[in-house]
Each structure stands twice: as C-alpha cells, then as structure tokens.
Amino acid sequence: MSGVSPLARRIAWSLLTFAALSWLPLAVSEYHTHVLIISLYYVILAASWNLLAGYAGQFSLAHHTFAGIGAYTSALLSLYAGVPILIGIGAGVVVAAIVGYGLGTLCLRMRAIYLALATWAFAESIRLLVSVEYPITRGDLGLKTALLFGTAQPTPYYYLFLALTLASLLVIWRIVHSRVGAYLRAIRDDEEAATVMGLDTFKWKRAAFVISAAFAAVAGGFQGHYIGLLSPTPMKFNEMAMIIIMVIAGGFRTFSGPVLGAVFIEFLSEELRAWGEVRMVLFAVLVIVVARAYPAGLLGICVAVGRWLTRLMPALAPLLATKPPED
Amino acid sequence: MALLELEHVAAGYVEGIDILGDVTLRVEPGSITGVIGPNGAGKSTLLKTIFGFLHPRRGRITLGGHDINALAPYEVKRLGISYVPQGANIFPQLTVEENLQLGAWVIKQDRTRVAGRLESAYAAFPRLREKRRRRATTLSGGEAKMLSLAKELVTEPTLLLVDEPSAGLAPRIVEQVYAQLLAVREQGVTILLVDQNINKAVQVSSYLYMIERGEVRREGPRRDFADQLHAIVRDALLGA
C-alpha cells in the first residue's frame, strides 16, 4: 500500500478491524458480549487519558468524572426536557469540554502533584454533588436512563461501541502523529524548553485537557444509555484507578498499550469478580510490578513475543512486522 | 535606532528582592553585544527578562521601538527573538531532525520554507546532518550545543539571546561555538551574548557591558575592554 497516506491506511485498518471483530457477538454469550462492550468503553477512557497523561504529561485524576458528566448531562436532559438521546449525548460532550476548559484554566499552571490533587478534589466534589442533589439526580438510588436502541440486548450496542472505539482511536492516533502531538510530547519532556521554542504551553495543555474530557464524555454518554442506570458509584476514585491500571499495565505512553490494557484488565476483573475488592489489591501489585520491572507493559510483551517468533520462523516476518513501542 | 533597548530595568523572582536593580543597555542591529560579569550578577536573569519568563518591575524593554515588557515567551519568540539557554536545550527523545523541525514548525508551517531552513542548518552544522536520524540523546555535549543553536536558527530570528555558550564544553568545541556565533552574525542576525568567559566574549563582541549585582558597572566598545582585560578579569573574580 505504498503511496497511500498513513491516515488512509489507518482508516482502512480500522474498517478491517471492524469487519474482523464483527462476528464476535454471534460466537459468544450475551454476558461476554456485555463484557466486550464495557471493555470498549474502557478502551476509549484509557486511550484518551493516555493522550493527556501519557503524551502531554498532565496527570489528571478527574477523567472518570468527565465520563460521569457526559452521562448525567444526557440522562437529565432526556428525562426532564425530553431531548433526543443523541442530542443529549452531544450536549454532554459540550458540557464536559466547557467544564474541562474551566478546570484546565484553573489547574494546568500547577505542576505534577498539585494538578493531581486539584483534579482529584474536583472529581470528589462532583461525585458528592451528584449524590447530594437527590431530588434531581436521585443520588445513590440511581437514575434510570432511556435505552439508546430501546432494548437491553447487547448485540447492537456492541457494534455501536466497536465503531465508536475505532473512530476515537483514529482521532487520537491522528492527534498523536500530528504537529500537535509533537508539541504535547515536547511540553511533557521539558516544558521550559518547549516555552523557549516559542510554544504557548498552557494553551496546548488546556487543549489536550479539553479533548480528553470530550472523549470521556462521549464514552460516558453512550455507556449510560446502554446500561440504563446511572449512579455516583462509577464516579468514585476506584474508577479512575482502573483507568490508570489499564494504561500502566498495557503500556504507558504508547498508542496501543491502553487498548490492550483496557481489554485485558476488564476481562480479568470480570473473571475475578468473586474476589470482590481484593481484585484492586491484585491490580495494584500488577501495576507496581509492571512499572518497576517492565514499563513497556503488555504491549512490550507482545512486541517481544513477535520478535522472538520472527527469529524462530523467519517466514513469519512480514506477518509479525512489529515496530518498537512508540514513544 | 537600537534593535533592543532596556531602560532602567528591574526584575527578580521573589517579591521584594530585585536580581536586576537598574539595567540600561542597547543592542545595535547586526552587532554582537556582550554582557559579562561574575557569578550571580544577574546575567541569566537579564536574558530571561527580555524573553518574557520574567516581567520588569520597573523600566522598559523595547524591540524596534515597540514595548515588549508584558509579553509572554511565545509572543516574544514570534517577534523574532530567540533564546539559547545554558546547557543543551533539546528534546533528547526526539531525533536530531525532529528537534529542528519542531523548532521551525512552531513559528512557520510552510513546508518548503521549513525544508529550506533545515537544509541551511545542516550546511552550517555538518555533524548534525550525519546524525539527523539519531536520537538527540546520543549527541556529545558539543553536538547538543550545536543542535540547540541550530534549533533556534531555523526559526530565522532577528535577535538571538545566548546564555553562556561555552559552559561545560571542551576547549576545542568552545572555539567552534564562538566561530558559529560569528558566522551567524555574518548572516545578519543580531546577538546578545551573556558570558562568564570574559576573554571570548571580548574577542567576539563589538560592544560590551559589565554587570555586577544587577547593575551596569562599565560599558564600552571592545577596544576599551580589551585594553584593560587584566584589570576587568581581576575585578570580576574578586567581585570588587
């Protein structure tokens, strides 16, 4: 496919991936289709948080909150104002982007740990607000939402989420491999040097913040209208921890790492459901081991296995052509 | 008219403590103007204030007659001022070429023009062409310094602020760095050079300022400084 632009090639790959994965709901149980949908939901969250934290170096702890903002905005609009679901989700994305812009303006001049603390405080405030505003949000009792396809049967939602995920990844890939992606990495690596270069670092950090918030709201909005019930529970810190675990386990600062990590951790988490909260301890240990011993994560393991197979069977080389994990 | 003018500029990092107390200086177009002085005199602070990392508490900075006191670094850069800080100001994880491209991209998104600028950067620094595909982390100290200089030149600045270009480099490399600065001036770029290497600064500059504790103690054309180099170096070392 030489002579084809990388973007066109990427789009072709996305379509092929869609086709290749479209048989899955026919082959697995409804329950597993559901787990797949939730995995895809997490892929969007993990990949968009990785754009902000991994590529731009801004360690926000409010990513799950933006998913919640998207979900609640859409649910409340359709419940109280009778707004069509898709327009509601669009509104949720706009609200999340505006809130992200405001929060970014307040927090992004802070460095590392202060940014994490400020976004965490914001996340907790929003969660409490949703809990406490019982008359509107129905608090911890949960808010029933309209189902997007009028049914709880997961198959149509699987195709929706597969398309949504591939489209999100395509956009994120495009950003990462553009001029803007280079700016973000420059800011992450040495903010002062980026300033000397003439970048308005604050502006670009805020842009990354707004974009990642919007992605989270897309995922949250659609997920809300699939599950049919919203509660403040997924706005707890546990949810943010899951996103971080997925990104670190998969391969921080790589493009495909968060995708692998999200699917792997979500399935593992479902398999270990009987363990309850103990899972978090297990995941924490996993993250420490990966961060300490193998920062390249699952993606790094896949690449290493691919190389090993190539050495073993050189004939496989074109099939397994692997690039080193992208920075 | 001077290209850059500072009038009674005061600046500092912490409230109540001025690092620059009262600095007045002029940089003539097409010249190399040197600023020398002992450690802690405020030389780097001077450049940071011009580039917009700090803003003057008192006084005025003008570029071509326009006030640039309140501008942020990216705005100053857009006016054609480039800043080469101490040490190597490069992105080690990017390749040499990516470093150069990034420098040019920020200012101009005209592909052919950027390509042309990269070509002339490679012509000026052949070592960088040899290593264009390598990550910048593999460069030697001298090469890294060349890259941080080249990275600024691709943006076609009118005024280059250079901070301690010889710090931490081997003597042979130091010669090359100053030769490059002279070559850059030949291309019509004005340079404001801040340096502890008094001998070298006096050699390449046409006009010099000596600052101490944030104030100008002495100024004059190269000749004046060259004649009294011994006395100046002694004063600077003793901080007298």
Image (cartoon, coloured by chain):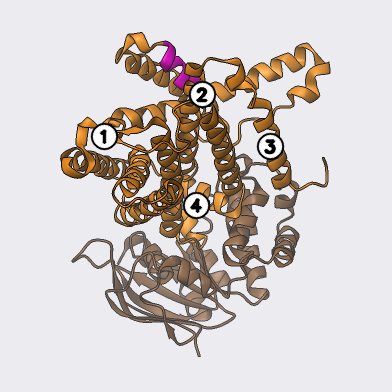
Colour of chain A in the image = orange
Residue that label 4 marks: B87
Could you tell whether A85 is left or right of A159 in the image?
left
Q: Secondary structure at mark 1?
A: loop
Q: Secondary structure at mark 4?
A: loop
Instruction: Name the residue that disc number 3 marks.
Output: A15
Disc 4 marks a residue whose amino acid type is Gly
Judging from the image, mark 1 belongs to the subunit labelled A
Tell whether position A270 is magenta.
yes
The answer to whether one can see residue B109 in this image is: yes
Q: Which residue is situated farthest in the bottom direction here?
A: B1
Magenta span main SS:
helix
CA–CA distance in space, label 2 to label 1: 23 Å
Q: Which chain is brown?
A: B
Mark 3 near mark 1, Cβ–Cβ under 8 Å? no
Looking at the picture, which amino acid does disc 3 mark?
Answer: Leu
